[in-house]
């Protein structure tokens, strides 16, 4: 008990609480979006917006490698007290983010047509999916650049700034949702316009915070400096940057392929199934984003310890984040066991959708206890900047776990989809845990 009291709880929660509060605004907003559309008269409105959102958020989640690498690199620069290195991390990330967003806008026709075609679903679902995605795609430069800004601020121990950016962005989105969908009667396109506008407001707020408060509160003596394009695009630095991001990108692509596969397969099983899965996926995102608050804190603490080459601090960060991850996972499972059916009833009043969602609810009760390990260990490995290990673990979990499991369970239809997802999360956690114990934990303290 004494050893538990000596863990750096205060440091963890100074980072984690703002991140938990800000992280959960994202899935809460998704639940509001789902509830706004879920109370329209037909399930295909919710099905269409879900497929359309997945088409766009697939790119954003895929670009999550920028957020992860930026957090890890910024945290290590913070640990080394290198303001110049920190600034270059931010600028390189923003340049890459904008290039990705503009490329997708330029080639939106082939991308949207192909992804919505492969998604399947009824003609109504496909129509509203395309209507939604044709609006949202113009927000990609802002949405992806926001990932870089949030990752950089978090790596510099500025979790409160991250919290305020996300709160302002999501409250804006919420207000515009209600205005456009219920006030103006824009249905699915109202949700898309609300999110598009909120993404650019979030980008403006993030840039404003960085400009007004300076680069790094820890290094107050170092001011913003003009950096040349030669420094930003330094060949050796870019080579290491893209090598790191390549591994995280592969890891993220494999993970998101599973999410998009579940959405598309659900669409093929019917409008009610894809609508029910949309509700449950938002519950899962609420769980994952909450647990990610602890993982985000672990990223920063582990990154700083790694930057200082302090193995004992790394172990302390791992122990305290593990303890609170377990506690939060248990709380989530209990909440959804007791109140899950009531939450579903609040989100949709379409009886067939509510019935289906309740029949799959036990997966949401069980998943926090299994998935929490992958969330935590992802955070630790981001802090360590060992992206290759994350990549290899995801290759095993998806190609030898999720897809073979779905093939064997496909006769169980949607239950089989959720079973395959459960196996994916189980393998992600156990693979990383095995590697961490034998390759990181057993190293001698510095």
Image (cartoon, rainbow, N blue to C red):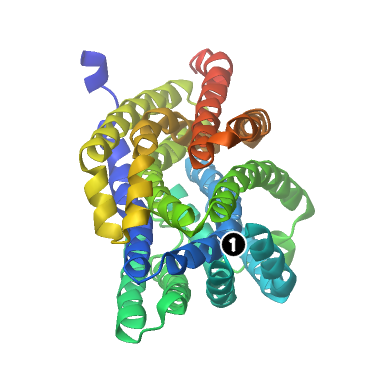
Q: Quadrant of the N terminus?
A: top left
Where residue 325 sits, quadrant-wise, is: top left
Residue at x 46%, y 33% (from the top left corner): 302
Front residue (pair 215, 379):
379
Residue at x 52%, y 28% (from the top left corner): 309
Percent coordinates x, y for residue 248 in the rendering: 63, 43
Tell me if residue 311 comes above or below residue 111 in the rendering: above
Percent coordinates x, y for residue 433 in the rendering: 51, 21
Q: What kind of element bears circle 1? A: helix
Front residue (pair 390, 403):
403
Residue 224: tell me if it is visible. Answer: no
Query: Which residue in the protein does label 1 denote?
Result: 55
- The outermost residue toward the bottom is 184
Percent coordinates x, y for residue 165 in the rendering: 37, 64
Percent coordinates x, y for residue 391 in the rendering: 65, 35
Front residue (pair 122, 241):
122
Residue 264: tell me if it is visible. Answer: yes
Where residue 388 sits, quadrant-wise, is: top right
Q: How many marks?
A: 1
Badge 1 crowding class, 10 Å Cα cut-off, few under 14, some 14 to 19, many 20 or more, is many
Residue at x 35%, y 35% (from the top left corner): 362
- Left or right, residue 107 beside residue 78: right
- Left or right, residue 64 beside residue 319: right
- The outermost residue toward the right is 235
Front residue (pair 413, 288):
413
């Amino acid at each position: 008990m004494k050893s538990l009291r000596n863990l750096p709880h205060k440091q963890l929660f100074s980072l984690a609480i703002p991140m938990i509060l800000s992280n959960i605004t994202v899935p809460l907003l998704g639940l509001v979006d789902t509830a706004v559309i879920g109370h329209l008269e037909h399930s295909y409105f919710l099905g269409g917006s879900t497929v359309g959102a997945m088409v766009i958020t697939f790119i954003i989640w895929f670009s999550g490698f920028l957020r992860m690498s930026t957090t890890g690199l910024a945290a290590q620069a913070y640990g080394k007290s290198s303001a110049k290195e920190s600034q270059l991390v931010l600028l390189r990330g923003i340049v890459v983010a904008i290039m990705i967003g503009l490329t997708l806008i330029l080639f939106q026709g082939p991308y949207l047509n192909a992804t919505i075609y492969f998604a399947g679903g009824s003609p109504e679902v496909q129509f509203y999916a395309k209507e939604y995605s044709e609006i949202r795609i113009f927000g990609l430069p802002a949405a992806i650049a926001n990932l870089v800004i949030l990752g950089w601020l978090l790596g510099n121990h500025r979790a409160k700034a991250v919290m305020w950016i996300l709160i302002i962005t999501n409250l804006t989105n919420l207000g515009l949702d209600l205005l456009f969908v219920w006030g103006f009667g824009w249905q699915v396109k109202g949700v898309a316009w609300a999110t598009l506008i909120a993404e650019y407001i979030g980008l403006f707020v993030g840039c404003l915070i960085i400009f007004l408060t300076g680069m790094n509160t820890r290094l107050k003596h170092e001011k913003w400096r003009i950096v040349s394009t030669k420094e930003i695009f330094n060949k050796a630095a870019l080579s290491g940057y893209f090598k790191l991001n390549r591994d995280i990108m592969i890891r993220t692509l494999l993970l998101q392929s599973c999410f998009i596969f579940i959405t598309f397969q659900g669409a093929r099983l019917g409008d009610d199934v894809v609508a029910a899965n949309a509700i449950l996926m938002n519950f899962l995102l609420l769980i994952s984003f909450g647990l990610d608050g602890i993982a985000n804190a672990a990223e920063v603490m582990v990154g700083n310890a790694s930057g200082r080459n302090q193995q004992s601090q790394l172990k302390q960060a791992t122990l305290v984040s593990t303890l609170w991850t377990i506690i939060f996972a248990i709380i989530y499972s209990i909440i959804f066991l007791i109140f899950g059916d009531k939450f579903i009833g609040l989100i949709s009043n379409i009886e067939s959708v509510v019935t289906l969602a309740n029949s799959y609810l036990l997966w949401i009760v069980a998943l926090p206890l299994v998935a929490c390990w992958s969330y935590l260990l992802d955070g630790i490995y981001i802090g360590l900047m060992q992206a290759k290990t994350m990549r290899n673990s995801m290759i095993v979990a998806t190609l030898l776990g999720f897809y073979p499991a779905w093939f064997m369970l496909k006769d169980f239809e949607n239950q089989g989809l959720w079973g395959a997802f459960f196996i994916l999360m189980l393998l992600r956690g156990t693979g990383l845990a095995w590697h961490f114990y034998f390759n990181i934990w057993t190293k001698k303290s510095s």
